[in-house]
Image: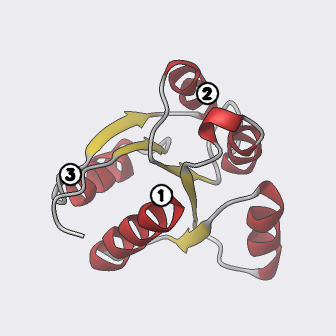
């Protein structure tokens, strides 16, 4: 939908990926908050309720699966769409993502148009 701006938390330990995601997603008018690790993501989430989270599976301090499962246990955050980003797109990773409650798993390297479409689609689907 045109004109819907979301707040999206991006957690990735690679600065280049954070920048890429910020550029891609802010092109749709979204407000992007970036953090370098799982602990920083949780610190941000204590005081904010983003519409979506993009979490790298291989985060330091606490991996994306763990951050995701914690997010899904907090009532205030349960409505947020969570997309996990992974270099691996195998059964084990997909199962872990599902068990953590993720709304989707995207394989790196990321395709810009596909990523933007998935984020918009997921957030809209979770809107009341």
Using residue 110 as the reference point, say whether residue 13 is left or right of it. Answer: right
Q: Left or right of 43: which side holds 99?
A: right
Secondary structure under the numbered disc 3 in the rendered image: helix
Give the label, 2 or 1, closer to the camera: 1
Q: Distance between the residues labelled 1 and 3?
A: 20 Å
Front position among marks 1 and 3? 1
* Front position in the image: 76 or 7: 76
Looking at the rendering, in which quadrant would you find the N terminus?
bottom left
- The number of callouts visible is 3
Q: Could you tell whether 36 is left or right of 101 in the image?
A: left
Q: Earlier in the sequence, mark 2 or mark 1?
A: 2
Work out whether mark 1 precedes mark 3 in sequence or the reverse, and give the earlier one.
Answer: 3
Q: Is mark 2 on a helix, strand or loop?
A: helix
Judge from the rendering whether residue 31 lies leftward or rightward of residue 87; answer left or right: left
> Residue 92's x, y, as percent?
82, 73
Q: Name the residue under label 2.
A: 42
Q: Position of residue 99 (x, y in %)?
A: 84, 62
Find disc 3 in the rendering and name its residue. Answer: 26
C-alpha gap between disc 2 and disc 3: 22 Å
In the image, which disc is placed on residue 127? 1
């Amino acid at each position: 939908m045109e004109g819907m701006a979301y707040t999206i938390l991006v957690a990735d330990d690679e600065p280049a990926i954070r920048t890429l995601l910020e550029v891609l997603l802010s092109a749709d008018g979204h407000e992007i908050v970036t953090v370098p690790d799982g602990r920083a993501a949780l610190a941000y989430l204590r005081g904010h309720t983003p519409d979506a989270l993009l979490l790298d599976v291989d985060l330091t301090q606490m991996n994306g699966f763990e951050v995701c499962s914690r997010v899904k246990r907090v009532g205030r955050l349960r409505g947020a769409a969570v997309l996990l980003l992974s270099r691996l797109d195998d059964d084990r990773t997909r199962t872990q993502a599902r068990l953590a409650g993720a709304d989707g798993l995207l394989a790196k390297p990321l395709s810009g148009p596909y990523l933007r479409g998935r984020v918009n689609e997921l957030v809209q689907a979770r809107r009341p």
